[in-house]
Amino acid sequence: MSISRQNLTIIIVTLKSENIIHKCLSSIDSDIPIIIVENSNNQKFKDELESRYKNLKCILSGSNLGMGTGNNIGIKAATTDYVFILNPDVTLEKNTLEEIFLNSKKIRDFTILSPINLDSNFPNYKSKKNNIEKNSPFQVEYIDGFSMLINKIFFKDDIYFDENIFLYLENDDLCLKANRNGGSVYIIPSAKINHSGAKAVDSKYKEEIEYSRNWHWIWSKFYFNKKNFNFIKAIKECFPTYISSVIKYLFYTLTNNNFKRKIYLNRASGFYNSLIGKPSWYRPKIDD
């Protein structure tokens, strides 16, 4: 099984990403088709991208649907067997794609694979093995969602990311699904990427994005553990965070630190909403 320029499409979900997206796009070979899924109605953004990059198609989702749903829209629109999910704050090295093409031939079968993040302090994978051979592709349990190359053929039901998850752990959920259904997840260490980290959305929305991240992280963590393991594990994983968040919320309320107060209020709220089975409804207020 191997990947080539003829059977690969790159998918990027964006939202208020005007200040970062061009650096990402400039790192991608101009003969690789790209689908941008913009989680808004920003027609100006779409027109600018499609006029500047001839290998690019931009789909407007109409509203902020989240990462998983946005990626699903792009995956289903792609006509190739393989899709490469990237965040807009990721850039490729000059030989990243060539290393992927070359090394994919060495793997007998794969469901998901990824280049390796250049910053070794923030590895983009999780593995139970300590003795990893890092000179050739190696198998892992999970990879981070900012870089995921997916074999669409494996998912014959056309069901990819869980659309109940708005943000966080949709990548872990997909990797777990692949592993449990006889698939495999790989890292290609000779292919490298740069991930800026939390730069996908314009920095002027920093506070709103932080509120959203804190709400969704704990909501998704509880949902993921309950769905894939059991309710007791979800409680064990998340309830200490809930108690800590309530205490910190009270402390920052008394000390008049409104930013921190809302951070911990959102963490507590995210846990409570997931606990009682409410959908992932919170959205950052970033409309101009």
Image (cartoon, grey):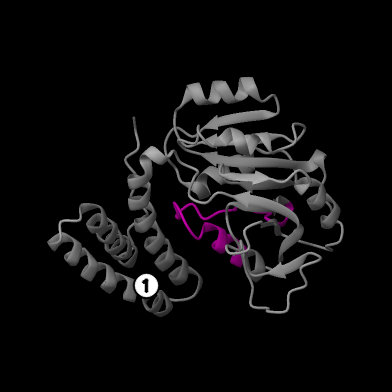
Magenta stretch, overall SS = loop
Q: Nearer the viewer, residue 173 or 227?
A: 173
Q: Is residue 51 above or below residue 264?
A: above
- Residue, x 49% and y 52% (percent of image)? 163
Residue depicted at x 78% and y 72%? 133
Viewer-nearest residue: 89 or 78? 89
Give the answer, above or below, for where 240 lies relative to 84.
below
Which quarter of the image is occupied by the N terminus? bottom right
Residue 78 left/right relative to 198: right
Residue 285 in sight here: yes
Residue at x-position 25% and y-position 55%? 262
Q: Residues within 10 Å of mark 1 (few under 14, many from 20)?
A: some
Q: Tag 1, which secondary structure? A: helix
Q: Which residue is mark 1?
A: 238
Q: Is residue 217 left or right of residue 71?
A: left
**Which residue is nearer to you in this view: 153 or 46?**
46
How many dots with numbers? 1
Residue 66 position, x and y percent, is 46, 46
Q: Residue furthest left?
A: 254
Residue 187 inside the magenta-drawn segment: no
Left or right for 91, reference 251: right
- State which quarter of the image contains the C terminus: top left
Specify whether residue 155 is painted magenta: yes
Residue 218 pos. (x, y %): 38, 63
Q: Which residues are magenta?
A: 153-176
Residue 279, percent from left and from top: 36, 55
Residue, x 52% and y 57% (percent of image)?
170
Look at the image and tell me whether residue 158 can be seen.
no
Amino acid of disc 1: Cys
Image coordinates of residue 286 in percent, x first then y, are 35, 37
Whether residue 79 is situated above or below residue 45 in the rendered picture: below
